[in-house]
């Protein structure tokens, strides 16, 4: 298998565990406190990676703006996920729902970037939506 698939699997595991840690933290402290500690980890990770990554400064401020916007949207998405969990959302429903965010990317790639979406990809989109619908259904109380 290609190296990228292994890295994607590691990301999948990390993000899967993250959903559990987010729910556990918001059971005890506010979503704002959880998010601030979450965000505090990023400078630590950046400092650890800095010696191994060549930093490229984009010459175009528009590109820098896109990069910063990506970080801002990522942060806002994390904060709202903490808040959803704090306000009673079950991790088994909230996390799968927010983690189908690639469907927004697929729509944007089609609409904004002119990428073609084939039948296989559309089947994946429908299956992802069906999975979230099924996961969000509460079990009948006995």
Image (cartoon, rainbow, N blue to C red):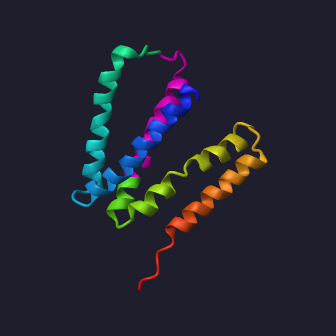
Q: Which residue is drawn at 66% across and 53% down?
A: 125
Q: Residue at x 41, y 16 (%)?
A: 53
Find residue 88 and report its horizontal and vertical position in percent: 35, 67
Residue nearest the viewer, comparing 66 with 10:
10
- In the image, residue 28 lies in the stretch drawn in magenta: no
When the figure is inspected, residue 20 is found, relative to residue 54, above or below; the finding is below
Judged from this view, the residue extending furthest toward the left is 28
Find residue 98 and report its horizontal and vertical position in percent: 49, 54
Judged from this view, the residue extending furthest toward the front is 1
Q: Residue at x 67, y 58 (%)?
A: 126
Find residue 122 and report its horizontal and vertical position in percent: 72, 51
When the figure is inspected, residue 41 is found, relative to residue 128, above or below; the finding is above
Where does the N terminus fall, quadrant-wise? top right
Residue nearest the viewer, comparing 129 with 115:
129
The count of marks equals 0
Q: Residue at x 25, y 57 (%)?
A: 30
Span colored in magenta: 57-80
When the figure is inspected, residue 14 is found, relative to residue 139, above or below; the finding is above
- In the image, residue 63 lies in the stretch drawn in magenta: yes
Where does the C terminus fall, quadrant-wise? bottom left
* In this picture, residue 140 sits left or right of residue 122: left
Judged from this view, the residue extending furthest toward the bottom is 142
When the figure is inspected, residue 100 is found, relative to residue 61, above or below; the finding is below
Find residue 77 and report its horizontal and vertical position in percent: 44, 48
Assign the magenta stretch its main secondary structure: helix
Residue nearest the viewer, comparing 127 with 94:
127
């Amino acid at each position: 298998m290609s190296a990228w698939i292994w890295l994607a699997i590691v990301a999948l595991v990390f993000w899967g565990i993250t959903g559990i840690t987010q729910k556990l933290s918001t059971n005890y402290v506010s979503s704002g406190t959880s998010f601030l500690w979450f965000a505090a980890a990023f400078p630590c990770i950046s400092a650890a990676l800095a010696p191994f990554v060549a930093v490229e400064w984009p010459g175009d401020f528009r590109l820098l703006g896109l990069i910063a916007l990506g970080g801002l949207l990522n942060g806002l998405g994390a904060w709202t996920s903490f808040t959803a969990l704090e306000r009673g959302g079950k991790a088994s429903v909230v996390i799968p729902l927010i983690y189908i965010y690639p469907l927004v990317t697929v729509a944007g790639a089609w609409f904004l970037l002119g990428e073609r979406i084939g039948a296989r990809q559309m089947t994946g989109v429908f299956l992802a939506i069906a999975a979230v619908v099924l996961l969000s259904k509460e079990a009948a109380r006995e």
